[in-house]
Image (cartoon, rainbow, N blue to C red):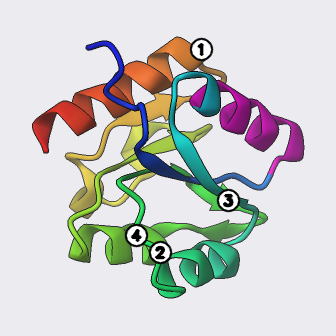
Amino acid sequence: MPDLLRGRTVLVVEDEYYLADDLRRGLEAAGAVVLGPAASLADGLRLIGDGRSPDLAVLDVNLRDVTVYELAEALMARGIPFVFATGYDAARIPERFEAVPKLLKPFEMGALTAALEALAARG
């Protein structure tokens, strides 16, 4: 699935600075336009509330002891596909997000781009 991220806007929500920067650089290298990274739920909500509409998103589940589920629900309501990047066991993520792809940290950048490309290919 080459170049499926090229030119697509990907929202990155990750509170760990170095990981957020790695995600940004890796996604840009794959041709994506990165929105963020946002380090908090409020920042993520603000980014999509500013009239910006990402094509895809990467969401860390736990942002300084605040879950990202409110943002995930907002993205679902807008039909924006996303992946969870998490250190949590998938069983700890609410059932309503069962169909959302989950990448267990630490993961390879190739796994993330493959997951996002698969989402992009669907829609």
Q: Amino acid at mark 2?
A: Arg
Q: Amino acid at mark 3?
A: Gly
- Type of amino acid under label 1: Glu
> For numbered disc 3, what is the local secondary structure?
strand
Say few, some or many: other residues with alpha carbon within 10 Å of mark 4 (under 14 / 14 to 19 / 20 or more): some
22 in magenta: yes
The span picked out in magenta is 16-27
Q: Is residue 106 left or right of residue 74?
A: right
Residue identifier under label 3:
36
For mark 3, does the 10 Å Cα neighbourhood hold few (<14), some (14 to 19), or many (20 or more) residues? some
Question: Can you tell which of label 1 and label 4 is closer to the viewer?
Answer: 4
- Helix or strand or loop: what does disc 1 sit on? loop
Which quadrant of the figure contains the C terminus? top left
Cα distance in 3D space between marks 1 and 3: 20 Å
Q: Which mark is residue 52?
A: 2
Magenta segment's dominant SS is helix
Residue at 49%, 77% in the rendered image: 48
Lower sequence index among marks 1 and 3: 3
